[in-house]
């Protein structure tokens, strides 16, 4: 299927590694021009080089999405460099603090900021550009933790808020021709990721977790997430908006108890 992404411009926050980089790579493989941002210059340069090798134009920015105007500046510079914006992906996320009794108010605020607030800022900054191009797609990378109970409640609450945000914005921005969705991956295994680290640190515990929670006996892959993301960003998903798309292989519990 031709996703009709050729020559479209896709922006991805946190596009230097993991899920964000896989999404940017898949968009580039489909003929899109991509802009990515990341916090570390060396990692950013490597990612830009890898994406550029696919043949399209690539714009990279060193950005801390928690900084004042960092997200907004990234969108403005990417739009100027690549000429337009057709899709944005709010991929940056994470959690601060431990389990509920160990996490303080600051941990909650930082977790909400890096997930929910960063996503809202990205979409808001992109709206004029998306609308100028006749509409487009905003995709927020959430998690199955947003709909299923698990450790680190501040993370689950932030992801649940992202899902609610997309549902609301699908309605509010629909008249402007802009679709907004969340993509909720389950546990994704890749080199350098948190699950790969846990496999090395606690192999028996993770093996038991996989056997118990995954009907197909394995975690997901980056490509399996990126393929769905590319579809949601594409005009082929023109009637998909305000919804949460889960990519988890029918996983049950979202995470293993770490402490």
Image (cartoon, helix red, strand yellow):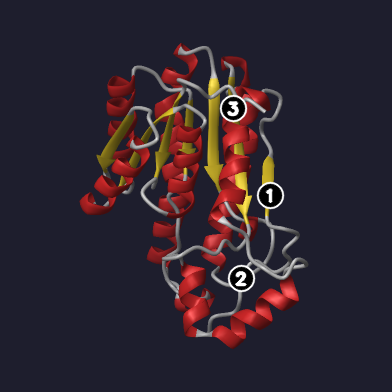
Q: Nearer the viewer, residue 77 or 191?
A: 191
Distance in Å between CA atoms under marks 2 and 3: 30 Å
The vertical placement of 115 against 86, above or below, is: below
The vertical placement of 207 against 119, above or below, is: below
Q: Nearer the viewer, residue 208 or 259?
A: 208
What residue does disc 1 label? 246
Instruction: Note whether residue 64 is visible.
Output: no
Q: Residue at x 39, y 45 (%)?
A: 15
Q: Residues within 10 Å of mark 2 (few under 14, many from 20)?
A: many
Indicate the secondary structure of the residue bearing disc 1.
strand
Q: Nearer the viewer, residue 44 or 123?
A: 44
What residue does disc 3 label? 234
Residue at the left extreme, as displayed = 41
Indicate the secondary structure of the residue bearing disc 2.
loop
Q: Residues within 10 Å of mark 1 (few under 14, many from 20)?
A: some
Percent across and percent down for residue 160 are 61, 52
Q: Residue at x 71, y 24 (%)?
A: 239
Horizontally, is 231 left or right of 62 in the view?
A: right
Percent across and percent down for residue 27 are 49, 34
Which mark's residue is nearer the viewer, 2 or 3? 3
Q: Residue at x 74, y 77 (%)?
A: 212
Q: Nearer the viewer, residue 115 or 252?
A: 252
Residue 164 placement: quadrant: top right
Which mark's residue is nearer the viewer, 1 or 3? 3
Q: Residue at x 67, y 51 (%)?
A: 247
Distance in Å between CA atoms under marks 1 and 3: 17 Å
What residue does disc 2 label? 255
Please tell me which of labels 1 and 3 falls first in the chain: 3
Instruction: Note whether residue 19 is visible.
Output: yes
Distance in Å between CA atoms under marks 2 and 1: 15 Å
The vertical placement of 187 against 34, above or below, is: below
């Amino acid at each position: 299927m031709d996703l009709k992404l050729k020559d479209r411009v896709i922006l991805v926050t946190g596009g230097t590694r993991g899920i964000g980089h896989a999404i940017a790579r898949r968009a580039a493989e489909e003929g899109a021009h991509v802009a990515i941002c990341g916090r570390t210059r060396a990692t950013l340069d490597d990612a830009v080089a890898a994406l550029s090798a696919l043949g399209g134009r690539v714009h990279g920015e060193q950005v801390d999405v928690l900084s004042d105007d960092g997200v907004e500046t990234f969108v403005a510079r990417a739009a100027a460099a690549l000429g337009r914006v057709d899709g944005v992906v709010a991929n940056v996320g994470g959690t601060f603090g431990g389990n509920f009794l160990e996490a303080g108010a600051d941990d909650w605020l930082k977790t909400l900021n890096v997930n929910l607030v960063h996503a809202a800022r990205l979409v808001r900054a992109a709206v004029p550009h998306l609308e100028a191009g006749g509409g487009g797609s905003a995709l927020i990378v959430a998690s199955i933790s947003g709909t299923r109970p698990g450790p680190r409640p501040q993370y689950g609450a932030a992801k649940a808020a992202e899902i609610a945000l997309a549902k609301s914005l699908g309605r509010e921005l629909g008249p402007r021709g802009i679709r907004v969705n969340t993509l909720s991956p389950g546990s994704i295994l890749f080199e350098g990721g948190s699950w790969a680290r846990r496999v090395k640190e606690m192999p028996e515990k993770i093996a038991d977790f996989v056997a118990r929670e995954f009907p197909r006996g394995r975690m997901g892959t980056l490509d399996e997430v990126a393929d769905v993301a590319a579809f949601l960003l594409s005009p082929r998903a023109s009637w998909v908006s305000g919804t949460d798309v889960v990519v988890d292989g029918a996983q049950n519990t979202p995470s293993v108890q770490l402490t």
